Amino acid sequence: IPEELGMLVSLRSLDLSNNLISGHIPDTFSGLSRLELLNLFRNRVQGPIPGFIATLPSLQVLSLWENNMTGMVPQTLGSHQGLLTLDLSSNSFYGPIPPSLCAMGRLERLILFNNMLSGSIPLGLGQCLSLTRLRFGHNSVNGSIPDGLISLPSLQILEAPNNQLTGSIILPHNISLVDTKMGRLDLSRNSLTGSIPSSLSSLSSLQALLLQDNMLTGPIPSEISSLNQISK
């Protein structure tokens, strides 16, 4: 990636996606104070996410998926005032999902699948009212699903297959009063236990429900049949 691009201080959008670009994200990019979108996906970019990324004041979209990047997801990204989309999927990032990623309450899309992430799902994500898409399948995330995550009012897609999640699927008692937008819920290939909650029928927008390859027990609730948008 040419370091000279960092001299374009008025640059608002940089899209170098779908190429064969290699190397690291240059330090000179720290001066791109007006940059709103950085698309480097489907390349051969290496190295960690530079710390200065979290200090780019105008950045709204950071898409680095399908590269050769590694390291931990920076905790400082959670303090960014304007970040709306963070897509780091299909890299080699490791360590926990930072608990502060939605600290500013603006993050809408968090895409982390196909990495080597571990640890539990941050409790704060269960309170991230702005979140519309959360995808972190094919990692080693463990522990239980935070209270409130499945019933977030704006969340349309929750995909967490092929992890090490345990515990039960729990929805709040007032889920029938929440105007949820959940269209796809994929918790397949984990180690979830307990029964399938009948309250899932309150997710009236649900089109796809994937729970296979867990350790769930008991009958399939008859209430599930009321989900008339489920794909046949």
Image (cartoon, grey):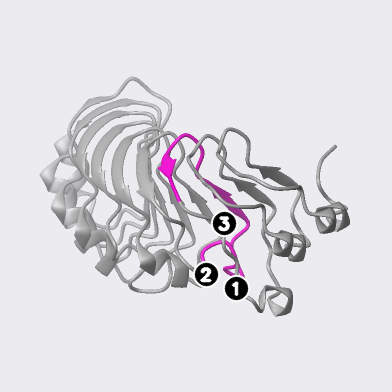
Circles 2 and 3 in contact, beta carbons < 8 Å: no
The tag on residue 172 is 1
Q: Secondary structure at mark 2?
A: loop
Quarter of the figure with the N terminus: top left
Is residue 164 shown left or right of residue 99? right
Give the percent coordinates (x, y) of residue 9. 22, 56
Check residue 169 in the rendering and tell me which mark sits there, or answer none.
3
160 versus 132 height, above or below: above
Q: Are marks 2 and 1 in contact (CB under 8 Å)?
A: yes
Secondary structure under tag 1 reads loop
In the orientation shown, which residue stands out farthest toward the left?
A: 27
Q: Nearer the viewer, mark 2 or mark 3?
A: 3
Q: Amino acid at mark 2?
A: Gly
Q: Nearer the viewer, residue 231 or 5?
A: 231
- Give the extent of the magenta segment: 149-166
Position above or below: 95 against 1:
below
Query: Would residue 211 appear left or right of 90 to someone viewing this image?
Result: right
